[in-house]
Image (spheres, helix red, strand yellow):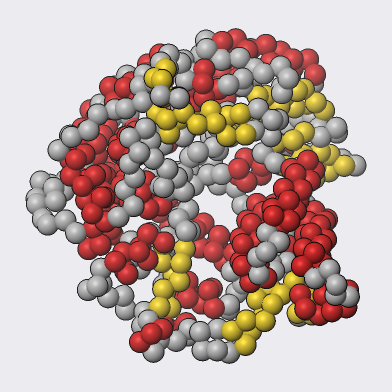
Amino acid sequence: MVNVIGQTEQLDWYSINWKRHKRIVRNLRGRIFRAQRKGNHNQIRSLTKLLLKSYSNILISIRQITQVNPGKQTAGIDGKTALTADSRITLASNIRDNKWQTKPTKRVYIPKKNGKQRPLGIPTITDRVMQNVVKNALEPCWEAQFEEHSYGFRPGRGCHDAIEQCFCLLNPSPRSSNNTWVLDADISGFFDNINHEVILESIKHFPGRKLILNWLKAGYMYKSVINPTNTGTPQGGVISPLLANIGLHGLQHYLQQVNPKIGFIRYADDFIVTARTLEEINAIREHLEIWLKSRGLKLNPAKTFIVNIQSGVNFLGFNLRRYHGKLLIKPQKQDVLEFCKNLGQEIKKRATWNQIHLINWLNPILRGKAEYYKHAVSKETFSYISHRIWEYLWRWAKRRHPKKGKRWIKNRYFHRIKGVDWTFAVKTSDRKGKEKLLSLYNVASTKIVRHVKVKGNASPDDPSLKEYWTSRAKKHGKLLWEKNSRNYRIAVNQSWKCPVCGEPLFNGEAIETHHIVSVKDGGTDEVCNLKHLHKSCHQQVHGHKSFRLG
């Protein structure tokens, strides 16, 4: 294996030292970030070239694309994936030896809420890996430049940060600007229409510019026909969200030059602008249309609204509205209704499933929805969802036993747990044969917790903020797991880090619990015998027979 210093060693996928390779990539990203903040363009160029050629970057990217990303099983036009250790080794070798070329994306369509279809472009597995390599080199440079209130598809930031900034802007207080008018903007076909020249001009000094040009111009294949791509960046590409952010960079600065008193929050191509008066917000809309036109874009008139905050505005699945002079952020009603309706239909389709399988399928869905809404005023919504789910499960149970009475069905499928009656649960047993109850996640019991917005223009690529990001990762885990629970104590014992790769547990990867001494060898479920690992790290532990985790 060739690493960044040119040494060679025999490559075995399951024996790779991920701590070392992640440290190399992280340090190079941090140096690029610092150089950009200092304006040292020569250093930026040399460090970027180094990271583009780094074998550590290639390995990290293969791991991300083939083991971590949810689309790892999806193939491009060549029909290839890399789901085995041997195929990943081959992929790494081909990329290192430059035995690959850019290919068109595979066009697929997914349904949108409005009944229309959204086009996705799926690159080949090799293109996706190389896009991740380029992204690792390009992203830290732009993380040092991106505007403060840009939150979408950026490391360490998310939709909850954007919503919290909305609260800061729109909740009347002595420190707020008391903006009452909101422009809820929607760009028509953003990913399909963004001007290539705008993106290429923005990255004109980037050493990997030619690769990005090739991906933008690669075209797409649909029904065995290759079609050109003269504009846009394909949704489905690894680097597309970053290019989208680059294409919209400067929008906040431009609008605040027009009117310094406006507020601005952007999540990818979704954004809102706030102002004090209707005249101000109308003037901003005119300037916004001019700026977008210069990039080959325009507003969607059917989805762009100017509203007073007293009437409410929907943003990122939440409804923002003032009630009696106070801003309340609630889950968007239509989204909640659609969620319940779709879940009810899916439960009905699973009429033949046993209760254990149904609960195991439902719990992550319900927990995920609760995690998304728990930072808003959601108690009433959570109670509503719980009630609707109970109705669906009651019908599911009655359909299974049409000749049984209601009391029998209730005793068969519902139990009283921790003082809560009518809990959908089933008796099962653990590995040692001890009886236990497996219960449905109670959405109504989810605690409401205020989200702490990321500070200023902080970035995980900033080496000076290492402790800040470590603290945020720990706080996320402490909110997810109940204090003194088994999962909580395991995480504390390993300092909230994955012992295999050394990264924070909550870095976006799936987490699995590993038995140090396996159950078949007499291992127990005690805290001292358990470790939380990232899913891909867990695969490594079990994939390499000589790997020992103490």
Residue 329 spot, x, y in % from top left: 76, 45
- Quarter of the image containing the C terminus? bottom left
In-image side of 193 versus 128 (left or right): right
Residue 253 location, quadrant:
top right
Tell me what residue is drawn at x 54 percent, y 64 percent.
477
Above or below for 470 versus 422: above
Q: Is residue 186 above or below residue 149?
A: above
Residue drawn where x is 73% and y is 56% of the image: 348
Point 57% across, 66% down: residue: 478
Residue 172 visible in the picture: yes
Q: Quick one: 495 or 101, which is closer to the camera?
A: 101
**Residue 354 in the image: above or below residue 277:** below
Q: Is residue 212 left or right of residue 98?
A: right
Pick whichever, 526 or 21, lies toward us. Answer: 526
Residue 80: give x, y in percent of width and height.
Answer: 33, 41
Q: Is residue 496 left or right of residue 257?
A: left
Residue 14's spot in the image, x, y percent? 25, 62
Give coordinates of residue 140: x percent, y percent: 37, 38
The mark total stands at 0
